[in-house]
Image (cartoon, rainbow, N blue to C red):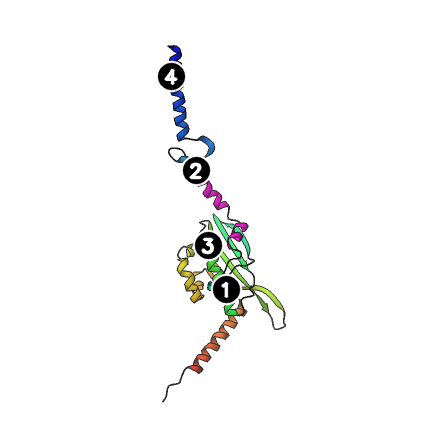
Protein backbone atom coordinates (compact mmCIF):
# COMPACT_ATOMS: atom_id res chain seq x y z
CA UNK A 1 0.00 0.00 0.00
CA UNK A 2 2.79 2.43 0.86
CA UNK A 3 4.43 1.73 -2.47
CA UNK A 4 1.17 2.49 -4.28
CA UNK A 5 0.84 5.82 -2.42
CA UNK A 6 4.42 6.73 -3.32
CA UNK A 7 3.78 5.97 -6.99
CA UNK A 8 0.57 8.00 -6.91
CA UNK A 9 2.39 10.94 -5.27
CA UNK A 10 5.22 10.83 -7.82
CA UNK A 11 2.72 10.68 -10.70
CA UNK A 12 0.86 13.73 -9.38
CA UNK A 13 4.09 15.72 -9.02
CA UNK A 14 5.13 14.80 -12.56
CA UNK A 15 1.78 16.04 -13.91
CA UNK A 16 2.09 19.32 -12.00
CA UNK A 17 5.65 19.90 -13.21
CA UNK A 18 4.64 19.12 -16.79
CA UNK A 19 1.78 21.61 -16.61
CA UNK A 20 4.12 24.32 -15.30
CA UNK A 21 6.54 23.64 -18.11
CA UNK A 22 3.79 24.19 -20.71
CA UNK A 23 2.81 27.62 -19.39
CA UNK A 24 6.17 29.04 -18.26
CA UNK A 25 9.57 28.54 -19.82
CA UNK A 26 11.87 30.17 -17.38
CA UNK A 27 14.90 32.13 -18.50
CA UNK A 28 14.90 31.37 -22.21
CA UNK A 29 12.71 34.43 -22.83
CA UNK A 30 9.72 32.58 -24.38
CA UNK A 31 6.15 33.56 -23.58
CA UNK A 32 4.58 32.84 -20.20
CA UNK A 33 0.88 32.34 -19.57
CA UNK A 34 0.44 36.01 -18.55
CA UNK A 35 2.65 37.30 -21.40
CA UNK A 36 5.16 39.02 -19.10
CA UNK A 37 8.23 37.46 -20.72
CA UNK A 38 6.99 38.46 -24.16
CA UNK A 39 6.57 42.07 -23.02
CA UNK A 40 10.05 42.08 -21.52
CA UNK A 41 11.55 40.75 -24.74
CA UNK A 42 9.68 43.38 -26.80
CA UNK A 43 10.94 46.13 -24.53
CA UNK A 44 14.49 44.83 -24.87
CA UNK A 45 14.15 44.68 -28.65
CA UNK A 46 12.83 48.25 -28.75
CA UNK A 47 15.76 49.43 -26.65
CA UNK A 48 18.18 47.58 -28.92
CA UNK A 49 16.67 49.20 -32.00
CA UNK A 50 17.04 52.66 -30.48
CA UNK A 51 20.68 52.03 -29.73
CA UNK A 52 21.11 50.77 -33.28
CA UNK A 53 20.83 54.21 -34.91
CA UNK A 54 24.41 54.60 -36.10
CA UNK A 55 26.36 56.07 -38.97
CA UNK A 56 26.39 52.62 -40.55
CA UNK A 57 22.65 52.01 -40.23
CA UNK A 58 21.75 55.44 -41.63
CA UNK A 59 24.21 54.98 -44.50
CA UNK A 60 22.73 51.56 -45.29
CA UNK A 61 19.24 53.08 -45.26
CA UNK A 62 19.90 56.07 -47.52
CA UNK A 63 23.11 55.77 -49.52
CA UNK A 64 22.56 55.09 -53.22
CA UNK A 65 18.87 56.01 -53.29
CA UNK A 66 17.84 57.75 -56.53
CA UNK A 67 14.48 59.01 -57.77
CA UNK A 68 14.64 61.39 -60.71
CA UNK A 69 10.91 62.17 -60.46
CA UNK A 70 11.55 63.88 -57.12
CA UNK A 71 15.15 65.07 -57.72
CA UNK A 72 16.60 62.56 -55.24
CA UNK A 73 20.23 61.46 -55.55
CA UNK A 74 21.77 60.26 -52.29
CA UNK A 75 24.91 58.75 -53.81
CA UNK A 76 28.12 58.62 -51.73
CA UNK A 77 26.64 60.58 -48.82
CA UNK A 78 28.52 61.27 -45.61
CA UNK A 79 26.64 60.72 -42.35
CA UNK A 80 27.18 61.91 -38.81
CA UNK A 81 25.06 60.84 -35.82
CA UNK A 82 25.35 62.60 -32.47
CA UNK A 83 23.51 62.47 -29.15
CA UNK A 84 21.29 65.46 -28.41
CA UNK A 85 19.53 65.43 -25.05
CA UNK A 86 17.61 62.18 -24.99
CA UNK A 87 17.67 61.65 -28.75
CA UNK A 88 19.77 61.72 -31.88
CA UNK A 89 20.81 64.36 -34.38
CA UNK A 90 21.59 63.18 -37.90
CA UNK A 91 23.64 65.23 -40.36
CA UNK A 92 23.92 64.22 -44.00
CA UNK A 93 26.24 65.72 -46.59
CA UNK A 94 25.44 65.08 -50.26
CA UNK A 95 28.35 65.56 -52.69
CA UNK A 96 27.99 67.40 -56.02
CA UNK A 97 25.98 65.53 -58.62
CA UNK A 98 26.95 65.31 -62.29
CA UNK A 99 23.26 65.35 -63.24
CA UNK A 100 22.74 68.91 -61.92
CA UNK A 101 23.68 71.62 -64.39
CA UNK A 102 22.36 74.87 -62.93
CA UNK A 103 21.54 76.74 -59.73
CA UNK A 104 17.84 75.95 -59.76
CA UNK A 105 18.62 72.27 -60.27
CA UNK A 106 20.91 72.12 -57.24
CA UNK A 107 18.27 73.70 -54.99
CA UNK A 108 15.63 71.29 -56.27
CA UNK A 109 17.95 68.35 -55.61
CA UNK A 110 18.72 69.62 -52.13
CA UNK A 111 14.99 69.80 -51.46
CA UNK A 112 14.35 66.33 -52.90
CA UNK A 113 17.18 64.76 -50.91
CA UNK A 114 16.06 66.48 -47.72
CA UNK A 115 12.44 65.38 -48.00
CA UNK A 116 13.38 61.77 -48.70
CA UNK A 117 15.99 61.55 -45.93
CA UNK A 118 13.79 63.26 -43.36
CA UNK A 119 10.71 61.20 -44.19
CA UNK A 120 12.73 58.02 -43.52
CA UNK A 121 14.75 59.15 -40.52
CA UNK A 122 11.90 60.67 -38.53
CA UNK A 123 10.23 57.24 -38.51
CA UNK A 124 12.71 56.50 -35.72
CA UNK A 125 11.27 58.03 -32.55
CA UNK A 126 14.75 58.81 -31.19
CA UNK A 127 15.63 61.19 -34.04
CA UNK A 128 15.24 64.78 -32.82
CA UNK A 129 16.84 66.72 -35.65
CA UNK A 130 17.92 66.10 -39.25
CA UNK A 131 20.16 68.35 -41.32
CA UNK A 132 20.88 67.79 -45.01
CA UNK A 133 23.61 69.74 -46.80
CA UNK A 134 23.81 69.64 -50.59
CA UNK A 135 27.23 70.49 -51.98
CA UNK A 136 28.21 71.92 -55.35
CA UNK A 137 31.41 72.86 -57.14
CA UNK A 138 31.79 76.65 -57.28
CA UNK A 139 34.14 78.41 -59.68
CA UNK A 140 35.28 81.94 -58.87
CA UNK A 141 36.20 84.75 -61.26
CA UNK A 142 39.82 83.51 -61.28
CA UNK A 143 38.81 80.05 -62.47
CA UNK A 144 39.46 78.41 -59.10
CA UNK A 145 37.03 75.60 -58.21
CA UNK A 146 35.94 74.73 -54.70
CA UNK A 147 33.35 72.29 -53.34
CA UNK A 148 31.13 73.89 -50.72
CA UNK A 149 27.60 73.74 -49.31
CA UNK A 150 25.07 75.07 -51.82
CA UNK A 151 21.96 74.47 -49.70
CA UNK A 152 21.47 73.35 -46.10
CA UNK A 153 18.11 72.26 -44.68
CA UNK A 154 17.40 71.52 -41.02
CA UNK A 155 14.23 70.27 -39.36
CA UNK A 156 13.41 69.22 -35.81
CA UNK A 157 10.99 66.63 -34.45
CA UNK A 158 8.23 69.15 -33.68
CA UNK A 159 8.02 70.34 -37.29
CA UNK A 160 8.42 66.86 -38.75
CA UNK A 161 5.49 65.51 -36.74
CA UNK A 162 3.20 68.05 -38.41
CA UNK A 163 4.00 66.83 -41.94
CA UNK A 164 2.18 64.30 -44.09
CA UNK A 165 5.28 63.18 -45.97
CA UNK A 166 3.41 61.43 -48.79
CA UNK A 167 1.61 64.62 -49.79
CA UNK A 168 4.45 66.92 -48.79
CA UNK A 169 6.93 65.50 -51.31
CA UNK A 170 4.58 66.49 -54.14
CA UNK A 171 4.24 70.00 -52.73
CA UNK A 172 8.04 70.33 -52.61
CA UNK A 173 8.34 68.93 -56.12
CA UNK A 174 6.06 71.74 -57.32
CA UNK A 175 7.90 74.42 -55.36
CA UNK A 176 10.93 73.95 -53.09
CA UNK A 177 9.83 77.04 -51.16
CA UNK A 178 7.27 74.81 -49.44
CA UNK A 179 10.19 73.04 -47.77
CA UNK A 180 11.71 76.38 -46.79
CA UNK A 181 8.44 77.28 -45.03
CA UNK A 182 8.19 73.97 -43.15
CA UNK A 183 11.83 73.59 -42.09
CA UNK A 184 13.58 75.24 -39.16
CA UNK A 185 16.43 76.41 -41.38
CA UNK A 186 16.73 76.64 -45.14
CA UNK A 187 19.98 78.29 -46.22
CA UNK A 188 21.05 78.92 -49.81
CA UNK A 189 24.63 79.85 -50.63
CA UNK A 190 24.92 83.56 -51.55
CA UNK A 191 26.34 82.76 -55.00
CA UNK A 192 23.46 80.39 -55.76
CA UNK A 193 20.90 82.86 -54.44
CA UNK A 194 22.34 85.65 -56.58
CA UNK A 195 22.07 83.55 -59.74
CA UNK A 196 18.52 82.51 -58.90
CA UNK A 197 17.46 86.12 -58.48
CA UNK A 198 19.08 87.04 -61.78
CA UNK A 199 17.22 84.21 -63.50
CA UNK A 200 13.94 85.37 -61.97
CA UNK A 201 14.53 88.93 -63.21
CA UNK A 202 15.32 87.61 -66.68
CA UNK A 203 12.14 85.53 -66.70
CA UNK A 204 10.09 88.58 -65.71
CA UNK A 205 11.67 90.59 -68.54
CA UNK A 206 10.81 87.87 -71.04
CA UNK A 207 7.23 87.81 -69.77
CA UNK A 208 7.00 91.56 -70.26
CA UNK A 209 8.27 91.27 -73.82
CA UNK A 210 5.93 88.41 -74.72
CA UNK A 211 2.87 89.96 -73.05
CA UNK A 212 0.94 91.97 -75.70
CA UNK A 213 0.39 95.62 -75.01
CA UNK A 214 -3.09 96.98 -74.78
CA UNK A 215 -4.18 99.22 -77.59
CA UNK A 216 -5.03 102.82 -76.88
Residue numbers of the magenta segment: 42-63
User: Magenta: predominant secondary structure element?
Assistant: helix
Q: Which of marks 2 and 4 is nearer the N terminus?
A: 4
Return the residue at label 3: 120
Question: In this view of the protein, which residue sits in the foreground, 116 or 134?
Answer: 116
Q: Which of marks 1 and 4 is nearer the N terminus?
A: 4
**Labels in figure, total:** 4
Residue 78 spot, x, y in % from top left: 56, 56
Marker disc for residue 40: 2
Q: Is residue 61 magenta?
A: yes
Return the residue at label 4: 8
Return the residue at label 1: 109
Q: Which quadrant does the C terminus fall into? A: bottom left
Which is in the foreground here, disc 1 or disc 4?
4
Q: How far apart are marks 3 and 1 (CA)?
A: 17 Å
Q: Distance between the residues labelled 1 and 2?
A: 44 Å
Residue 96 spot, x, y in % from top left: 56, 63
Amino acid sequence: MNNQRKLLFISCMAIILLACGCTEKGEDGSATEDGSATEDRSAAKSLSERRGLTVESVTDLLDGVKDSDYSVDLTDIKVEVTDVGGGKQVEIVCPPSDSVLDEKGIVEQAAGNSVYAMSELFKDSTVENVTVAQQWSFTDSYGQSKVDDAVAVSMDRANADEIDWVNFKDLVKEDYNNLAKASNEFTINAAILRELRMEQKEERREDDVVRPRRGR
